[in-house]
Image (cartoon, grey):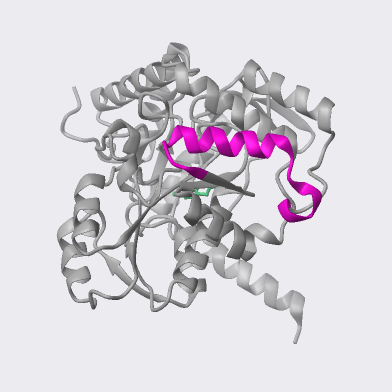
Amino acid sequence: MNYEAFFKSALDGLRSEGRYRVFADLERQRGCFPRAKRYVGDDAHDVTVWCSNDYLGMGQHPTVLAAMHEALDACGAGAGGTRNISGTNHYHILLEQELADLHRKEAALIFTSGYVSNWATLSTLAAKMPNCVVLSDSGNHASMIEGIRHSGAERVIFRHNDPEDLDRKLAQIPADRAKLVAFESVYSMDGDIAPIAELCDVADKHSAMTYLDEVHAVGLYGPRGGGIAEREGLMDRLTVIEGTLGKAFGVFGGYIAGSAAMCDFVRSFASGFIFTTALPPAVAAGARASIRHLKTSQLERARHQERVAKVRRRLDAIGIPTMANPSHIIPVMVKDPVKCKQISDWLLDRHNIYIQPINYPTVPRGTERLRITPSPLHSNEDIDALVGALHELWSQCALARSSAAA
Ligand SMILES: *Cc1c(COP(=O)(O)O)cnc(C)c1O
């Protein structure tokens, strides 16, 4: 086999389908969020980032950075081992206590990333519980899907955010089988929110475990940043709450929270937890500082919601079609992969505005979009520039406006 030719032809296939991914070469500038330096060949210039998952700018918060500097100076760079073999650092223990408290659970367990926490936990639970069947929302993230697949357990997909469909599907499964219902709170591409109470009601009715991915909600919702389940007073109804330390908390890593026995079970059986080097202590310290800050400060959450509402209002006023949803994610619908990429390129090259195009397979064909994530640190001038640029490019690409346009 000609290996190189194989790799190249597979990549050509992606290119011809418009699915080849091009990364923007950025250097984030501490203290200047949402500004970053963009490298183009030997040149570098400032761009405004409108698609970051550092939703609150906590990745540059002075409290977070101070905690990381302190831990780095105290402990050095790496953890020095897996959690089991010399890698457990006191900062890991403190972080897990902080997370258990955040979700009002007995325990928490940290992982190398949110992806790994979903993958390792779902694959371990579903594989080890005898004769387990997993009920998976059709909109679930790749990390959950891969974890469930890896478990080898039977999987039943229920219609997105549909408790009645879940009820029907659970009713067909023998009562004595182990059942795990896996879903998310805020879905990252459409920005819609699960009916958590109704899904938990159905799960309870059939004695099923519940597993909630709150990756796009922790830090952002609830009086202490515990997520949508905290906001709605539902944290105690979930068997497992999973989250990331890399999005609104602005650092890196993932976790689960739940009962002491469940966390101890995953700690003891999950290959993706056991056989990998622990998070650097400074990362754990930074994440903990971010969580602690957002447990008491409402400033960032309030300003975030205000900025989101303002961007939505301004786009509505000029008829730029957005997908309606109750969250902080603003999907601007282009519905054409070539135009979506073109608008994104023009925003970057002509207006120094960075919004990555979202095309198939991340979203279904025909729903290509620009996913805008306003932060508390985007200024009125940033919003003016964004709205002005989209107004101009929308006309240039001859895209339809929504009828709500003034
Ligand atoms: C980003 C994401 C993850 C993975 O979290 P990381 O910490 O980035 O690995 C898990 N679930 C959902 C829904 C996500 O969007």
Closer to the camera, 101 or 320? Answer: 101
x and y percentages locating residue 288 in the rendered image: 60, 30
Q: So how many labels did they put on this image?
A: 0
Figure quadrant of residue 160: bottom left
Q: Is residue 96 magenta?
A: yes
The residue positioned 26% from the left and 34% from the top of the image is: 232
Q: Locate residue 220: give its quadrant.
A: top left
Question: Is residue 47 left or right of 243 when viewed as pictured?
Answer: right
Vertical side of 199 occupied by 244: above or below? above
For the record, the magenta segment spans: 83-107
32, 174: nearer the viewer: 174
Image position of 276 (left or right of 159): right
Q: Position of residue 172 (x, y in %)?
A: 19, 76
The quadrant of the rendering that contains the C terminus is: top left
Going by the image, does 336 lie left or right of 261?
A: left
30 w.r.t. 92: above or below: above
| Residue occupying the point 63% across, 41% down | 24
